Amino acid sequence: LKQEQAAVIDAALFKRDCLAVMPTGFGKSACFLLPGLMEQGITIVISPLKALMYDQINYLNSIGVMKMIIHSNYFYGLVEADANSSIVNALSEVGDQNKLRRFLTVLYQRGLLLRFVVDEAHCIRLWGTDFRIEYGMLGVIRKCFPDVPLMALTGTATPATQLLICNSLSLQDPFKSINRCVRSNLKIELVKKSTSAKNLQILICKIAAIDKSACGIVYCSSRKECESLALLFVKAGYTAAPYHAGLSDVERDACQQQWMSGLCQIMCATNAFGMGVNKPNVRLVVHLSMPTSISSYYQECGRAGRDGLVASCVLFFQFYDHCYPKHVIAKKMNQGTRDFETKELWEMVDYCENVFECRNSIIARHFGEELVVCVEGIAKCDNCAAQV
């Protein structure tokens, strides 16, 4: 165990609320799995996405931990009164909220609720106002189960987001483990968009540069782009599959399993894919359009290089990429949300147009971390590489 993991585990065993910001591959799951296995009772893990939930369930299966799945289409499993330990994964948008609350109330009354864990807690800010409304309403947990400890976990969070998480969940004097988000093994590069044919040519070259035993993710801006790009990769001789909300649960799960097992090398996906998915050999993450914030961008880059080896993160950019998200933001009802997301969007535009400053330094400043320059690191960003 890392010292930071052990500190969070100790705090959890002392029934304290916890906030842990740990970079991808740091081992956040151990912070709730080990206390859950050491104590008698049930740990409820709340996830924002089915892909993330199923990945965790598969891991729990592999280590023989009693488990249960709850989401809008399924409510199954068995939790015995004398269970020594159990992990329950619940999707934030579970359909029958009353049924879920009754289930949790029974556990609570029987003294079986150990703690609630909110995974990918940055989504409270990222999605909690419009996409996953339920993620912005998780503070009800504290009201319903006031003496059950809460643990919030995420890979990236600015100081403002950390404060929002604590306030939204009503964390009480939480133990905080705030670790550096910026990782030295990610080689960040921006590519100015050209013609579609030229962009595809560059993209194919990036894929050809990774080992055949490794894999990659290409983030697309639409379902149609996911489908068409996957077909182009297959025609170019690569194994590729689309992943987006327009596919059925069975289709998405099949695509994810093929990618996880290595049968599919390139996943063409919308930005929901990959959050928390534990695959160490992702050597390439590509964004075909500019994300709406540095936080979202680096969270998605974090899918790469979980094994600590060098991985490439490539962003295709043109100034007009900001026009559509600006239009979407302008339609949001809440003025505070509009102001915050507009500020984040322009910060991302400035990041993309900056051709002089170390990109890792810009990202570190965004997250309130000590500034770093990657010129001495193992993976230089395009700006630092150009100055050597």
Image (cartoon, grey):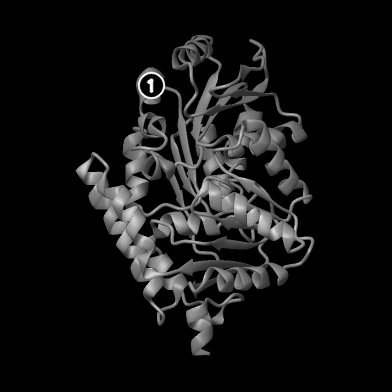
- Residue with the most extreme left position: 335
x then y, percent, for residue 15: 48, 30
Q: Is residue 283 above or below residue 114?
A: below
Q: Amino acid at mark 1?
A: Pro
Q: Secondary structure at mark 1?
A: loop
Q: Is residue 184 above or below residue 41?
A: below
x then y, percent, for residue 226: 58, 51
Residue at 41%, 60% in the rendered image:
294
Residue at 33%, 35% in the rendered image:
168
Left or right of 296, for residue 273: right
Left or right of 317, for residue 25: right
Question: Is any atom of residue 205 visible in this view?
Answer: yes
Instruction: Report the front residue among 115 and 226.
Output: 226
x then y, percent, for residue 44: 54, 26
Alpha-carbon neighbours of circle 1 within 10 Å: few (<14), some, or many (≥20)?
few
Instruction: Report the front residue among 328 and 158.
Output: 328
x then y, percent, for residue 287: 52, 61
Question: Is any atom of residue 187 visible in this view?
Answer: no
Q: Is residue 133 above or below residue 196?
A: above
The residue indicated by pointer 1 is 146
Circle count: 1
Instruction: Report the front residue among 73 and 81.
Output: 73
Residue at 63%, 72% in the rendered image:
201
Q: Is residue 356 above or below residue 154?
A: below
Left or right of 165, for residue 273: right
